[in-house]
Image (spheres, rainbow, N blue to C red):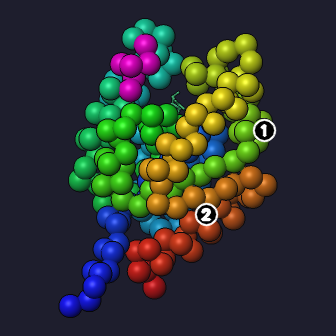
Amino acid sequence: MPDELPTAPPRDNIILIGFMGSGKSTVGRMLAKRLRFHFLDTDRLLEERSRMAIKVMFARYGEPYFRERETATLESLSGLRRHVLATGGGIVTQPCNVPLLRGLGWVVQLTADPAELYARVAKSTSRPLLQTENPKERIEAMVEERRPLYAAAAHFTVNSTGLAREQVVELILEEARAVFGWE
Ligand code: S3P
């Protein structure tokens, strides 16, 4: 008997986590195409199911309600196979979501410097948490606050600062081949 059993490869889904503007949706779609996996985005799924935009949900019912719906969306995906899943930037703030994410598959964190994140989301009006007087400061504070949460949830991290999306996809694919034992 070997001392340690080999670690089983995770379920064949790739779960992308990371701050707003880290590229989860764009990279996720590209990754899914390359792997011939399906692509899903928890925010879009939640919006479709509730027939309401996230910013409307925040305004009408508040963030705690959104977080409940977000967890319910994640729970509903337990049978997923061969998917790339992009998640909302705050999904790691609810501790109960972390085992759900890791149970679903291989969790990849996308990071980028706050200045780059800001540049990517500066014009967005659909992100209620950034509709403040000083979104740049808000991003810096939230990135700091969430840093340990993303790190604890992730199996693998890619820092996309200064990289083209294609390069980010390649880095994930390279690691995925080893993790899943793909040829
Ligand atoms: C949020 C990120 C958003 C969305 C909601 C809350 C967050 O998703 O889920 O506005 O708390 O960081 P994106 O990361 O796709 O922008």
Residue that numbered label 1 is attached to? 115
Instruction: State the residue at coordinates (39%, 34%).
Output: 94
Assign the magenta stretch its main secondary structure. Answer: helix
Q: Amino acid at mark 2?
A: Val
Residue 159 visible in the picture: yes
Magenta residues, start to end: 62-67
The residue positioned farthest toward the front in the image shown: 3
* Percent position of residue 166, x then y: 68, 62
For label 2, the SS is: helix
Question: In the rendered view of the protein, which quadrant contains the C terminus?
Answer: bottom left
Residue that numbered label 2 is attached to? 169
Q: Would you say residue 120 sits in the magenta stretch?
A: no
The residue positioned farthest toward the bottom in the image shown: 1
Instruction: State the residue at coordinates (32%, 34%).
Output: 71
Check if mark 1's residue and mark 2's residue have beta carbons within 8 Å. no
Q: Is residue 177 left or right of residue 82?
A: right
